[in-house]
Image (cartoon, rainbow, N blue to C red):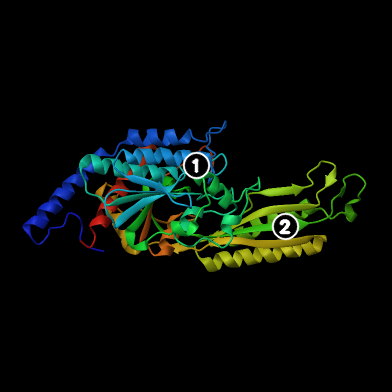
Amino acid sequence: MGQDIGSTAPNGASYSRAVRAANDLRSALEAVSVERIAARLARLSRIGQTPEGGVTRLGLTSEEREAHDLVGGWLAATGFASRHDDAGNLMCSRGDGPWVLAGSHLDTVPNGGAFDGALGVVAAVEVAESSREAGLDLPLAVAVWMGEEGPRFGGGLFGSATATGLIEPGAWDRADAAGVSARQAAAALLGRAPELETALLDRSAFRAYLEVHMEQSSVLAESDRPVGLVTRIVGISHGEVRVEGTADHAGATRMHERGDALAAASECVLAVERLAREAGDRAIATVGELHISPGAPNVIPGSCTFSLDVRAPEDADRRELFAVIDAAARAIGRRRGVQVEVLHVGEALAAPLDGDVIRMIGAACAEVGVPDPPAIPSRAAHDAQNLARFGVPTGMVFVRSTGGSHNPFEQVEPADAALGAQVLLVACSLLAHAGR
């Protein structure tokens, strides 16, 4: 994609600029602060903090907006202009484009952790701060995407999908448990009806997109490596399974007369687990939400609905597992004399990341003392996949994490977080100067 920032240029003036830029980059790397990163992550974790020590900060809520405003304030102090688009994304930039765009999200799952998403946002802010302190000329923009997790409205990557024109039809009309649609929630925060078309990004305004993220798995921890290169992001199928039986008296209805929706749903859930195990490493599936009606101890469940999440690095494997689960659930329903309907709610396609950007991230890792970082596919969805599908050259940096993810115990060590920010800083600089 172009010469290294430190390469010798063909004339004296260009060579002097290259040397000055290289010196500024070294100064910026030295300015990256472990303490500042840790303090900002801790400050964000207090917005939506739960009694269990986790964080609940759902998309399009006052908590998410408070976190956005906090980050906007940090960036304003470094000379960034910030605005919220109509999709609820916080878009910030300094100087003239085309920019290298960096960012992540600040929403969480219910009772989630302090690092999922927030790490990438704070790393991008740290790049902005350290580069300004060092006088490094870096055409940087920062995005804080709205609603990446998606539990409130039944689908993730809301903000980035809208900004890249990849949002599914009808997604903004989905309602939360209180009956409030995403469109209504956005209007309440904006103070007016959102015009979602205006949130579409100008692809030509960005040289590349980079995202730092906690790994959420154990590959880096088990291999004792602090950072890794993401090669591709899995595709996801979101489904809903509805089981309709017959509600009846728990004492007066004999066992052979029952149309127990929960018993049938339970067998379906076990079938999901079994079929996913049989798929090996090709695909995985999860049931994470289940609702029973009428929900009384002395009433046989008449209906049951549960979620279905199917993921795979290859879209063909994902769709195959979803279809196999669909057929198995319907067969269970027929055998038990209840109705089973498997609905496909939505999907995110698998996304390979840009080879040139991956190589530059690898060079950035070597620059900060991490040679030969492991290449890892992401089995979680990220906003980066929408930017990649949109046509912006995209790369991701994984940072070692422990304690799992989507829970209060997820953890990234401060030194690893700072190293991730340094990798991001060097990669942004390389990409900013590529092709000059």
In this picture, is 255 found above or below 332?
above
Residue occupying the point 82% across, 53% down: 260
220 horizontally vs 136: left or right: right
Residue occupying the point 80% across, 49% down: 301
Q: Is residue 108 visible?
A: no
Question: The residue under label 1 is which amino acid type?
Answer: Glu
In this picture, is 51 found above or below 350?
above
Residue occupying the point 51% across, 39% down: 63
Mark 2 or 1, closer to the camera:
1
Q: Quadrant of residue 389?
A: bottom left
- What residue occupies the far front of the structure in this picture? 192
What residue does disc 1 label?
Answer: 64
SS category of the residue bearing label 2:
strand
Q: Is residue 297 visible?
A: yes
SS category of the residue bearing label 1:
helix
Q: Position of residue 123 (x, y in %)?
A: 36, 44
Going from N to C along the chain, the mark reached first, 2 or 1, is 1
Residue 260: assigned label = none
What is the spatial separation of the Cα atoms under label 2 and label 1, in whole angstroms?
Answer: 31 Å
Label pair 2/1, CB-CB below 8 angstroms = no
- What residue occupies the far left of the structure in this picture? 12
Q: Position of residue 431 (x, y in %)?
A: 27, 57
> How many marks can you see?
2
Question: The residue under label 2 is which amino acid type?
Answer: Arg
What residue does disc 2 label?
Answer: 242
Q: Quadrant of residue 115?
A: top left
